[in-house]
Amino acid sequence: MSCNDTHIVVTGMGAVTPLGCSVPRFWQAVSRGDDAISTLDRFDLGGIACTRGGQIRGYTPPATSVSPGTCGLATGFAAGACVEAIAQAGGGTDNLGIVTASNFGALDIGERALAGEEGGRLCACALDAATKWLAVALGLRGPAVTLSLSCAASAAALAYAAELLCAGRAKRMLVVGYDAISRCAWSGLCSLRTMSRDRVRPFSRDRSGTIFSEGAAALLLERAETCEERGGVALAQLVGWATGNNGFHMTAPPPRAAGSAQVMRQALNRAALPAEAIDHINAHGTGTQANDVTEAQAIADVFGARAGSIPVTSIKSSLGHMLGAAGGIEVIAAILTMRDGLIPPTMYYSAPDPECPLDVVANRPRAAQVRCVLSNSAGFGGCNAAVILTR
């Protein structure tokens, strides 16, 4: 069976976010446009200029076959999202593989070791440490893969998992993007000078930058025939995907976000769909000056005259930028948009930017019949990914 003959479906979703630690709680909050950003209080911010982010408080990781106390914050977030996704998909892990996607991995544990604090483990700094922990703790018997592709990591992980399924190397794959805010990670993110000091305002004329958040998003993918054989329920079909790296600059997007335009076109080609089939775009929409302008240009280059009439939203406006989990949580929002006929709002949008001539779903949710949605992701270092889902 060729990849073109293989149908990939999503059967489970899980979310641990600053807006709520389950998919229903996240969806209710992001649909209302709730604000996840608060003043950080996990560690001493002395000397760090950026003081506001999307912090999760009071979260307890789920019970697993390995003590959750050994995993740290980041891996605990990932475990929670994975357990929820597996449960929704009907359980069973014997034939289940995993792809993890993260910027910092379990750096929160490695950081404690470097500081000489109790409970720290330097080996946790290896990005595959969380992958191994999750595979053992959740009893996963399929392929175990670790990806770190900046803020395009989760979407790229979905594409990679889909390729494994198409190639017959797995029947079911769990994809989880995750990250946690630690002092080391936060100091580095602040040094990039891309963070707003107040709010994230994607595509708005007065935008001043992004704000980073922590958490995890998990999606369980499987072949459609596998889902049917076991009596599972498909939540959506993953019909198109693409990843790439334009290698233009370590942090800046290339002119007209050429890399994003390329993966969007490639995802459409893989889906065998015309651009006219896309009903809605869940944008990367970071709220930075350069990203929003170039992403709008890429949308114009791909969709032509329709670019200004396709509803576009960025949930980073209320959730913040969830780093390695960003693409995954945005795909979850896209699936729920199709299910409920409701596009979540781009909050704090005050005035159109002539350089971003898009139909932004501004400040309140919009009812819409969405049958096909594109989710776009991009990251530092030229990483790009796009996925297309149908109802």
Image: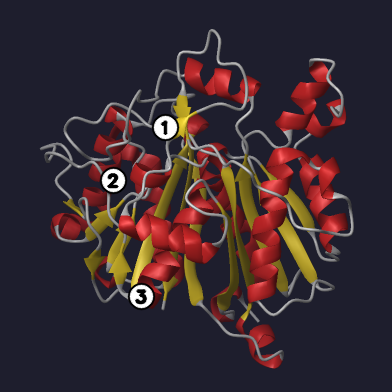
Mark 3 in CB contact with mark 2 (< 8 angstroms): no
- Disc 2 marks a residue whose amino acid type is Ala
- Disc 3 marks a residue whose amino acid type is Asp
Of the image marks 3 and 2, the number of the one nearer the N terminus: 2
Is residue 3 depicted above or below 379 in this figure? Answer: below
Give residue 288's position: percent from left, percent from top: 32, 30
Is residue 209 depicted above or below 191 in this figure? Answer: below
Asked if residue 103 lies left or right of residue 273, the reply is right
Residue underneath mark 2: 298
- Nearer the observer: mark 3 or 2; the answer is 3
Of the image marks 2 and 1, the number of the one nearer the N terminus: 1
Give SS at disc 3: helix
- Disc 1 marks a residue whose amino acid type is Ile
Give residue 106's position: percent from left, percent from top: 73, 36
Front-most of residues 190 and 311: 190
Q: Residue at x 45, y 19 (%)?
A: 50
Residue underneath mark 1: 211
Give residue 28's position: percent from left, percent from top: 41, 62
Gap between marks 2 and 1, in whole Å?
A: 23 Å
Residue underneath mark 3: 340
Q: Which residue is drawn at 28% across and 26% down?
A: 208
Asked if residue 9 lies left or right of residue 200, the reply is right
Give SS at disc 2: helix
